[in-house]
Amino acid sequence: MSTRSILFATICTASIFPSALQAQVLTDFEDGNIDQWLTEADGVPSLSASGNPGNCIRVTDQVLSVINQMVLPWAYTGDWSAAQTNDSLSFDLFAHPNNYDPLDTEGLPLITISGPGGSAVAYIDTVPVFDTWQHFSIALDSAAWLVTGSWTALLAEVQTVKVRTEFNQGSEWVELDNVLLTIAPLIEPLVGTVCSTWDSAGFYDGWSFQSVGSIQVSMAQGNPPGSVRMGDASNALTNAVAAPKFRGDWTDLDMQANMTFDLYLQTSSSNYIDKDYLVRMSGPGGAAKFNCNDSLTALLVNQWHTVEIPIDAPSWELLSGTWSGLLDFVAEIRLELEFIDGTGEVVYLDNFCLNTGITTGTPEPGAEGSTLLYPNPTSGQFTLQPAATADLRTIQVMDASGRTVLSRSIANNAGLVHLDLSNHAKGLYQVRIGQADGTYSMARLIVE
């Protein structure tokens, strides 16, 4: 059977699928399409005819001292709440080291899923056997994962799914085939504010960086504290492709949102190139680009500059299709981060956000108006004011990458709850407010 990476309902044999009738997501690469299959860090993806069987996707390691991970396409992300403990994410893997020097054989993270509600990692205890196909299947059961945050909240919105594709200290290539998720995630419109801030070393947040001479999350240069540092590669244009959490239905963002990100161009050269674009968005309904001229490039030289782009048709040059058709499903956001002719540059990227619904001074209500959160924005200290009927029991604060930075248990009828994020980075946070009956609400908080 051959199918592209799509959501579908099908009747087929149990030798391929675990049940006779259910919606699933399967990619066997037989259609030759790998457009939305990207690698986090320095790996180079390509189509290979040596699959299990037929076609597969191959990741070739550039040996830049970062761990490659395959970032699965949008069809694998969304609402996983329907998952049962007998559902799973599975795939076939073939690893080939060009020089035999395997990584540590215990506690290797194999799959990582993350979202606003937390993150979870599935570990394996041994490096895969080299030069043979192996099948891996991880149950969608919290017992099979190391969970940060709430498993239930995580499954409600899975924004990024990553599979490790590096198992050797030196040069290698790794192939994936028959990637199967036994549920069909619900894809909902992109709402709220979504950010990548790169504030932890080695954490790339599902982004793919292509044609780089070097790549790292730098904790020495950020706005603040960390950022992605890209060294220039020879005879190639450096590109950054946004994580899957930014993809989706942008219809409600039209004329209501903006895209912002911080750039720092470290260079001693003023020999600027004539860039094709700074940002390019594309999808089944069309493509559009935001252009960059020398005046904008000059603002980036040896200093941080925030680029702000409205999500509206006049700000973009339409390349194909229609603006409304493009926003129906934005499948890829690509940044061209090459500015200097030659290799005399280093580029830093930080705080990439789609900003919507930002409040500026009034308390932020949680779900159904149950809780007020103020001041918002804040310099760090803020207050939760429960409604009279609320029965708060837990408060969890997560940063823009979904990691928990503050957790608090609340006594019954505690009244006002005062919290402090002064020692944490500026940026966007999600506040998860748990009730005694097991329900919860979410509110946004901006720390300035």
Image (spheres, rainbow, N blue to C red):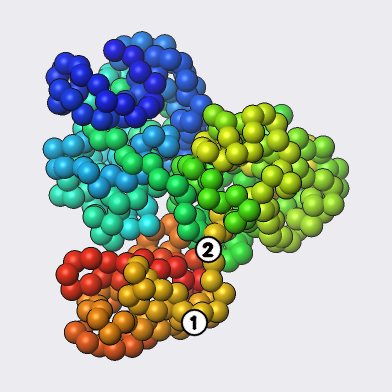
Check disc 2 and give the amino acid type: Gly
Circles 2 and 1 in contact, beta carbons < 8 Å: no
**Secondary element type, mark 1:** loop
Q: Is residue 103 left or right of residue 426?
A: left
Front one among 16 and 288: 288
Q: Nearer the viewer, residue 233 or 227?
A: 227
- Classify 164 as above or below 294: above
Q: What residue appears at the point 22 percent right and 79 percent down from the top-left corner?
A: 391
Q: Which residue is mark 1?
A: 375
Q: Count neighbours of disc 2 (C-alpha within 10 A) and say few if under 14, some if 14 to 19, many if 20 or more.
A: few
Vertical comparison of 33 with 246: above or below: above
Residue 189, horizontal then vertical, whole percent: 45, 47
Quadrant of the image for the C terminus?
A: bottom right
Q: Residue at x 16, y 42 (%)?
A: 84
Image-quadrant location for residue 225:
bottom right
Residue 226: x %, y % from top left = 55, 60
The label shown at residue 315 is none
State the SS at label 2. Answer: loop
Q: Residue at x 60, y 62 (%)?
A: 222
Q: Earlier in the sequence, mark 2 or mark 1?
A: 2
Graded by Cα atoms within 10 Å as few (under 14), some (14 to 19) or many (20 or more), the crowding at tag 1 reads many
Which kind of residue does numbered mark 1 sit on?
A: Pro
Which of the two discs, 2 and 1, sits closer to the camera? 2
Give the residue drawn at x 71%, y 60%: 305
* Front position in the image: 58 or 233: 58
Residue 357, numbered label: 2
Q: Position of residue 247 (x, y in %)?
A: 49, 42
Residue 90 seen from this side: no
Q: Is residue 79 above or below residue 177?
A: below
Drawn side of residue 363 relative to residue 16, left or right: right
Q: Where residue 185 sits in the image (x, y, percent)?
A: 32, 39
